[in-house]
């Protein structure tokens, strides 16, 4: 019985440790996101997955506000 209790405690401690690591990583990513936005780097995407739309002057694309996968790779 004591082995089972020790096993349960160790599993719960491992789970709590992993949850703590995820929270730390999330806070770190939000901090980096705020730093990038302060420097003028925004999550604008104009890739094919966003459905590129040509602007009225036909010399570029309209940027959208959907964060792209490249934006998330910068935060890691």
Image (cartoon, rainbow, N blue to C red):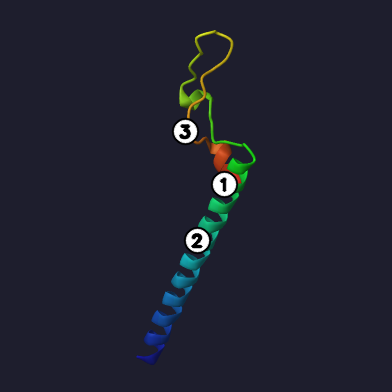
**Residue under label 2:** 22
Total numbered badges shown on the rendered structure:
3
Q: Residue 2's x, y, as percent?
A: 38, 91
Residue 63: percent from the left, percent from the top? 52, 24
User: Which residue is more in the foreground, 24 or 55?
Assistant: 55
Q: Nearer the viewer, mark 2 or mark 3?
A: 3
Q: Secondary structure at mark 3?
A: loop
Mark 1, secondary structure of its residue = helix
Label 2 and label 3: CA atoms lie apart by: 24 Å
Q: CA distance from mark 1 to mark 2?
A: 16 Å
Mark 2 residue crowding within 10 angstroms, few (<14) / some (14–19) / many (20+): few
Of label 2 and label 3, which has the lower sequence position?
2
* Tag nearer the camera, 1 or 2: 1
Relative side of 9 to 76, left or right: left
- The residue that mark 3 highlights is 66
Q: Nearer the viewer, residue 4 or 63?
A: 63
The outermost residue toward the right is 39
As drawn, which residue projects farthest toward the bottom?
2
Q: Which residue is mark 1?
A: 33
């Amino acid at each position: 019985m004591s082995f089972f209790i020790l096993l349960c405690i160790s599993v719960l401690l491992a789970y709590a440790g992993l949850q703590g690591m995820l929270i730390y990583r999330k806070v770190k990513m939000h901090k980096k996101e705020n730093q990038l936005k302060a420097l003028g780097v925004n999550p604008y995407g104009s890739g094919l997955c966003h459905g590129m739309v040509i602007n009225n002057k036909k010399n570029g694309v309209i940027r959208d506000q959907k964060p792209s996968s490249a934006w998330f790779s910068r935060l890691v």
